[in-house]
Amino acid sequence: MAAPGEGRRLGAWAATAMVVTNVVGVGIFLTPATMLRTVGSPAAATAIWLGMGLLSAAGAICYAELGTRFPRAGGGYVFLREGFGPATALVHGWISLLVVDPGLTAALALGLSQYLLALVEAPASWGPAVAMVTIVSFGAVTLLGIGASAALMTWTAAAKLLAVGALVTATLLRQEPPVLDPDAAAPVAGLPGAGAVAASVMAAFFAFGGWWELGRMAGEVAEPRRTMPSALLGGIALVTSIYVIATLGFMRVAGGGVPASDEALVAAMGTSLFGAWGPTALTAIVVVAVGGSLAATMLGSPRLYLAMARDGLFPRSLARFDPARGTAPWLTLVQVVLSCAYVAAGTFEQILGYFVPAAVFFLGLSAAAVLRLDRPSDPTIFRAPLHPLPILLFLTLVVGVLALFVVGRLL
């Protein structure tokens, strides 16, 4: 089995684009809308976004160090194996194969199908079928090679940045009073309560989800010592800017009231900024954003199983790698089949409940490998500054999010 990494084809911009496309997906507008409805205050919302960006950057710094120390396919699996032993890595690998990766792929495909059907005014009942077709289609794109996937991710990342630029321009040029639902509630007055802050923190964390997937591609990142930290931190900075700008734009458009649902707020914002075509334009942007996230997920997921196969923990017959195209055909097929099975088995919300706790737990544990490993003075390795402060900050975030998730499911 040939291992990926013989030709490092992901440069700084392609790697940064992978971070942005992985992160900014279905929540590109809905999460800022949630932020507006829960905290209401521009200062509070901006503080939450900046805080989440800072804590995510703390985790990204740790992943950058681990990715440059172990610049090969696998990401969190490799970090867990080196830091906590093969048994922990084995559990993570199989949970990723059977739960996390197909669950995430299915959730993204269902989210994309909902918006795509709304865009073409087709029945919502077609959602599962459209989601399965979407998964198969993006699997086919993945099999075309890493060049095709990288081009798609770069294009969608640029489209997201252009969309936010258009949003900013329209918001600044807009002079008419806001046009909102007459049943809209008044903005939150004073400081937001603990429940509102908790809900916003959870929404913000999931809105940042996915930056760590670049670790799986470390074997194909050019000049890892330079590219990994710049792509991770640069990508998180871009994502933070996108969410802050979108949230402040929503708040300016909302003016005197807040619609009762995220979807109503997005529709009101689109109409207010861009007229009758506004909701359609914003829906199309979401479709493009989710498509980029799906492309990045389909490309990165098989790299973990390649690492498992190298360790004899996954059938080598399924883990054949095509070094010319940078693809693992059988592993991509496995992901497509399992993801379609998840689509057939549950709704968007049910699928999120399956994979979120495991994904968050192993994310924190894999980053914590920097506490378990020696840190050699090697100029080819990026060393996280202010160690161990970044990992302690990030673990605090992970524990807090897991606690909020459990409490939310019990209430």
Image: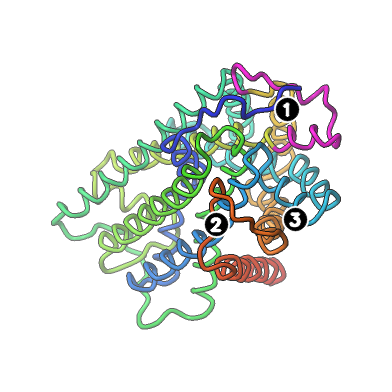
Location of mark 3 (residue): 83
Name which quarter of the figure residue 144 lies in. top right
Q: Say which of 400 and 305 sits in front.
A: 305
Residue 87 highlighted magenta (yes or no): no
Amino acid type of the residue tagged 1 in the rendering: Leu
Which callout, 1 or 3, points at the residue further toward the start of the chain?
Answer: 3
Classify residue 261 as left or right of residue 206.
left
Q: Say which of 15 and 174 sits in front.
A: 15
Residue 100: x, y in percent?
71, 46
Location of mark 1 (residue): 331
Residue 383: which numbered mark, if any?
2
Q: Which circle, 1 or 3, is nearer the viewer?
A: 3
Mark pair 1, 2: CA separation: 33 Å
Residue 153: x, y in percent?
46, 33
Q: Which residues are magenta?
A: 304-326
| Residue 119 against residue 244 in the figure, above or below | above
Mark pair 1, 3: CA separation: 26 Å
Q: Which circle, 1 or 2, is nearer the viewer?
A: 2
Count neighbours of disc 3 (C-alpha within 10 A) and say few if under 14, some if 14 to 19, many if 20 or more: many
Q: Say which of 357 and 227 sits in front.
A: 227
Which quadrant does the C terminus fall into?
Answer: bottom right
Q: Secondary structure at mark 1?
A: helix
Residue 282: x, y in percent?
36, 42
Q: Which circle, 3 or 2, is nearer the viewer?
A: 2
The figure's colour scheme reads rainbow
Q: Secondary structure at mark 2?
A: loop
Which quadrant does the N terminus fall into?
Answer: top right
